[in-house]
Image (cartoon, helix red, strand yellow):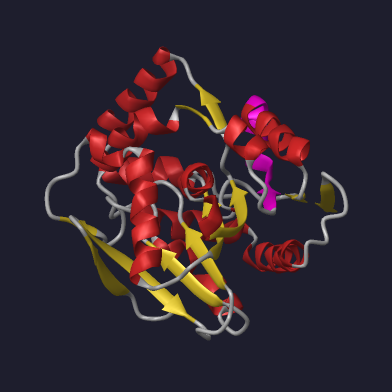
Amino acid sequence: MSKTKKARLGQITMEYTLSGDSNQSVLFFVHSEGLSLEEFSEQHDFFKGRYRVLSASLRGHGNTLSDQELGETDYDLALMADDLIKLLNFLDIKSAHYIGHGLGGILGFELLKLHEKRLKSLITFGSYAYRKNTSLTKALRKFTYGMLNPKGISNLRSSRGLTPEAKIRIQKLISPTAKECFINLNNYLTHYDYLSTIKQSKIPAMILRGSFDQKHPKSIRKTVEAFQSRGNFLLVHLNNAGFFINIDQAERFNQELEKGLAILSANQVSHPEARAVLV
């Protein structure tokens, strides 16, 4: 992956990396909760010969800095999405294929709501457009992160990886993240609804679905149904891949993402739902 750079965006100084030919379409990879732009190092190496590839570390993550200590309100999803728009403006990028994982995918839904014209397509994995957790569930999640030290949090999050190698890499990516980041994000990641935003949108979209999604059947079902209802949507199942599909099955992830991008870019989704099943 290319050397990281910094972009001054108001009170936030955002870490990013950009590689590939400036004449090519941009792929914008945005990481999951607690990780950083390093999550997509393999994707940079794979796609940079055919696309211009951008990744960034969100506020509170990686080496992205803030002029002041971040509190709970600083993790509002609209603010975090606005950081990404400011980065595109800073780099003079008019639009991009957006690929978001977990929190990154949720921010993709926020961008779909506020800045759809900046997206050539929206591709998510491990992300849901609908979550309505109870107050008890939110409180338990907040309590859990509050009780754990950084190593405990990295162990908890890395348990979503399927292979020993993936778990080790996830631990290394998560361990630098302060637990306050997880605590402050808690309210924003447990109660939201972008279903109407999806139904009203028009850009091509794709979900890469792994086995972890089975743990949230209502959320993933509602998300898929919202996209299916409006069409121009591709659903791809990757078996034997957990929450971190791009780390558990990097080669397969890259191949299926490349295929999906070709289909979406050519507007070849022939029906409201196109489905590819990997065994």
Asked whether 192 falls inside the magenta stretch, the response is: no
> x%, y% of residue 51?
59, 78
**Range shown magenta:** 205-218
Left or right of 200? Residue 86 is left
Q: Nearer the viewer, residue 3 or 99?
A: 99
Seen from this angle, which residue lies furthest right?
270
Residue at x 63%, y 43% (from the top left corner): 201
| Residue 165 in view here | yes
Left or right of 31? Residue 145 is left
Residue at x 82%, y 44% (from the top left corner): 272
> x%, y% of residue 222?
67, 29
> x%, y% of residue 183?
29, 33
Asked whether 208 falls inside the magenta stretch, the response is: yes
Quadrant in the rendering for residue 184: top left
Q: Nearer the viewer, residue 27 or 254?
A: 27
Left or right of 268? Residue 84 is left
Residue at x 70%, y 65% (from the top left corner): 261
Quadrant in the rendering for residue 169: bottom left
> x%, y% of residue 212?
63, 40
Q: How many marks?
A: 0
